[in-house]
Image: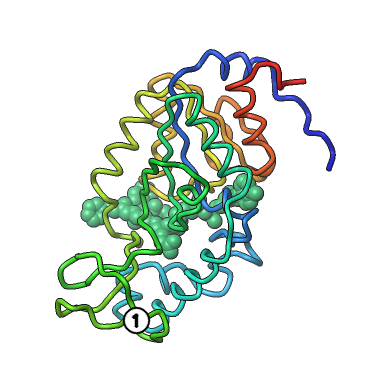
């Protein structure tokens, strides 16, 4: 593998000075673990189905078996995946600096990498809840092809946030606080299209934080971020974190 070019020196200087960090991650950080992103044209989770057929409460009402089996397939996929150097770099950063790690991902790979506190904005695919009471149910029979009945009268649904549903209030509040308090906001592997998550870096910009995007592709955030680094999270995040924690590691 070719050596990465050094990071821009103004970025390195600011990373070394900063004390309070926040990071917002999206599906791209897990791409190198083999978990497909949502919006990639050929390989994305939504290449075959439109989001509204799978990730809305209406879709679940209309065709619960389709939605349930899609999530059962994804649970298997993420269970077989392992965290990559991008996930591990954020563990390293938290060991050296105060970091609020905010994720839109439901795959649990940050926690499996060793991140102890993860603010999950869109839930977690490894939990299910009862549609009647909202209570978390575990374990359940993964072999079912349709949502199993819950002990409290409803059926089970994945404990994730679909379009049109409110995000968990405490998680969103914590994420916004971190965006407003941090000096550096890292935005990693997200298309920055889905709100309210996409508003977090904008809030950080408003209050003067340095926003650093890591993504192989441009996003609606790219022109507004202070630095938009083009490349894979598994390569660039370790380099960025090394710059934060160890001045000598930069070429
Ligand atoms: C790499 C890489 C590598 C590739 N390294 N990078 C304001 C304006 C407009 C619309 C709205 C608004 N506010 C709300 C809305 C509506 C809606 C919304 O945002 N719609 C837009 C799409 C237009 N938002 C909602 O409905 C939200 N709810 C809400 O606002 O409720 C209000 C309410 C209040 C009170 C009561 C009731 C309601 C809910 C949003 C929920 C999103 N849910 C999903 C599914 C979760 C469950 C599941 O996993 O199945 O979350 S949708 C999907 O998108 C998933 C993701 O978390 C989310 C973001 O996707 P992400 O992570 O950015 O993935 P991709 O695929 O888009 O991008 C991957 C990126 O990685 C790409 O850029 C690649 O280039 C990059 N990449 N390899 C680094 N190696």
User: Residue lying furthest right in this view?
Assistant: 2
Q: Residue at x 38, y 48 (%)?
A: 195
Give percent across and percent down for residue 107. Answer: 47, 58
Q: Quadrant of the N terminus?
A: top right
Display coloring: rainbow
SS for dot 1: helix
Give percent across and percent down for residue 180. Answer: 35, 26
Q: Quadrant of the C terminus?
A: top right
Q: Quadrant of residue 216?
A: top right
| 54 relative to 246 in the view: left or right | left
User: In this orientation, which residue lies closer to the viewer: 175 or 153?
Assistant: 153
Give percent across and percent down for residue 222. Answer: 58, 36
| 105 relative to 127 in the view: left or right | right
| 169 relative to 22 in the view: left or right | left
Q: Residue at x 30, y 42 (%)?
A: 172
Give percent across and percent down for residue 5. Answer: 78, 29
- Depicted 103 relative to depicted 129: above or below: above
- Depicted 200 relative to depicted 227: above or below: below
| 152 relative to 237 in the view: left or right | left
**Residue labelled 1 has its Cβ within 8 Å of some atom of ligand 1:** no
Q: How many marks?
A: 1
User: In this orientation, which residue lies closer to the viewer: 218 or 234?
Assistant: 234
Q: Residue at x 19, y 65 (%)?
A: 134
Q: Residues within 10 Å of mark 1 (few under 14, many from 20)?
A: many
Q: Quadrant of residue 98?
A: top left
Q: Residue at x 38, y 58 (%)?
A: 124
Q: Which residue is denoted by mark 1 in the rendering?
A: 64
């Amino acid at each position: 593998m070719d050596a990465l070019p050094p990071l821009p020196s103004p970025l390195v200087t600011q990373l070394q000075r900063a004390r309070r960090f926040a990071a917002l991650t999206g599906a791209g950080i897990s791409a190198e673990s083999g978990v497909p992103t949502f919006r990639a044209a050929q390989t994305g989770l939504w290449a075959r189905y439109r989001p509204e057929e799978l990730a809305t409460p209406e879709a679940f009402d209309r065709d619960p078996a389709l939605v349930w089996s899609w999530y059962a397939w994804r649970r298997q996929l993420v269970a077989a995946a392992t965290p990559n150097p991008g996930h591990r770099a954020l563990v390293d950063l938290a060991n050296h600096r105060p970091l609020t790690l905010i994720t839109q991902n439901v795959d649990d790979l940050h926690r499996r990498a060793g991140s102890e506190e993860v603010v999950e904005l869109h839930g977690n695919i490894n939990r299910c809840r009862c549609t009647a009471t909202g209570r978390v149910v575990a374990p359940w029979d993964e072999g079912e092809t349709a949502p199993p009945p819950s002990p409290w009268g409803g059926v089970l649904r994945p404990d994730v946030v679909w379009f049109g549903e409110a995000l968990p209030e405490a998680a969103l509040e914590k994420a916004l606080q971190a965006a407003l308090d941090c000096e550096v906001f890292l935005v990693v592997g997200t298309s920055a299209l889905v709100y309210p998550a996409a508003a977090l870096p904008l809030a950080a910009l408003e209050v003067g934080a340095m926003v650093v995007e890591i993504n192989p592709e441009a996003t609606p955030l790219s022109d507004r971020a202070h630095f938009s680094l083009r490349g894979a999270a598994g390569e660039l995040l370790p380099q960025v974190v090394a710059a934060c924690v160890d001045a000598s590691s930069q070429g």
